[in-house]
Amino acid sequence: MLDHSVVLPSQPRVVSEDAVKGIYEIDGLYIGYGHTLGNSLRRIILSSIPGWAVTSVKIDGVPHEFSTIDGVKEDIITLLLNLKRVRFVAEGNEMQTFTCTVKGPKKVTAGDLNVPGQVRILNPEQYIAEITSKTNLEMEITLEKGLGYVPKEVHQRGKVDIGTIALDASFTPIRRANYEVENMRVGDKTDYNRLRIVIETDGTLTPREALESSIDTMIRQLKAVVGFKEDEPEEEVIVSKKEKEVVAEEDTDTDVLKTRIESLEELSSRTVNLLLSANIRTVGGLVRKKGEDLLDIEGLGDKSVQEVRRALGNFGLTLKQ
């Protein structure tokens, strides 16, 4: 009789693969594990792989997105939709700001954007607008890194300068992710699972990188709970003696430690999303971390750590020393 305890699945096998689409198979999964693993990986691929997106645009002479520009064929909404189709990759994690200054008549494409050296445009032929007269089109564009889909109301948090148009941001570099499960023979059993995963990206990363990243994310999440260690509920935050010393001795308010990080106005939506993905949900969770602990979180950089320090400073708190 087959010993299920020693049967392990195979490593992913490439069925077909190119720069943007890949099909991979994992054989020998125990009965029912195909759907268990496939659904988990699909959810991680769609929600937890970071990417770059335009989050705001400032156009000279345009007060809001419902405007038009004399001499430009497209209205502002159409122009912004075309701009959101431009795919970017950049080094590091910091927000990037760049301009586009074009004089007509001319068809404006992504290749006309004046991006800095650390930013690369993958589809420079992407059409943005057409200037039909000797009109100048001047734009200032903000590019940020993040996870998933973030509405403009969330990532801007009301801090928008006059004339700046905030955009809903779809950070995910994944266009499609699906899986199929079929039965296969292992030993004398014919109901083991073969998992087939289909991944299509926007070209900012390869399908293989997306799959490897999702597997790594799942492993790290599971390692965090190995041992069945029970943490104290967030509603009953226990403050250590060292942490209490951080709070002013005359006014130690442990309720502050229960404050959700989503309510901290000093934190950008990207920083909040990355902290939540690392299971840091409260001020109490932040003060337990050192600066280098936060830098170990994928996607968090020095700028984000400074945001955290400023947010904690408002409560008289600091990161763990």
Image (tube, rainbow, N blue to C red):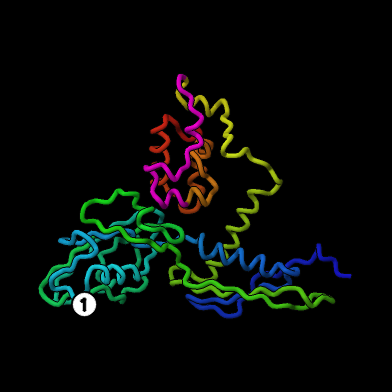
* Drawn side of residue 83 relative to residue 269, left or right: left
Residue 113 in the figure: left or right of residue 135: right
Q: Secondary structure at mark 1?
A: strand
At x 66%, y 73%, the residue is 195
Residue at the image position 51 percent from the left and 44 percent from the top: 281
Pick the front one: 112 or 192 = 192
Residue of label 1: 107
Find the magenta span and give its range.
250-273
Residue lying furthest left: 134
Magenta span contains residue 272: yes
Q: How far across and how far down the image is residue 254, in percent?
A: 51, 29
Q: Is residue 36 above or below residue 281?
A: below
Residue 267, x across and y down, in percent: 39, 45
Looking at this view, name the residue that lies furthest to the top: 250
Per the image, is 295 magenta? no
Left of 69 or right of it: where is 22?
Answer: right
Q: Nearer the viewer, residue 209 or 314?
A: 314
Judged left or right of residue 81, residue 8 is right
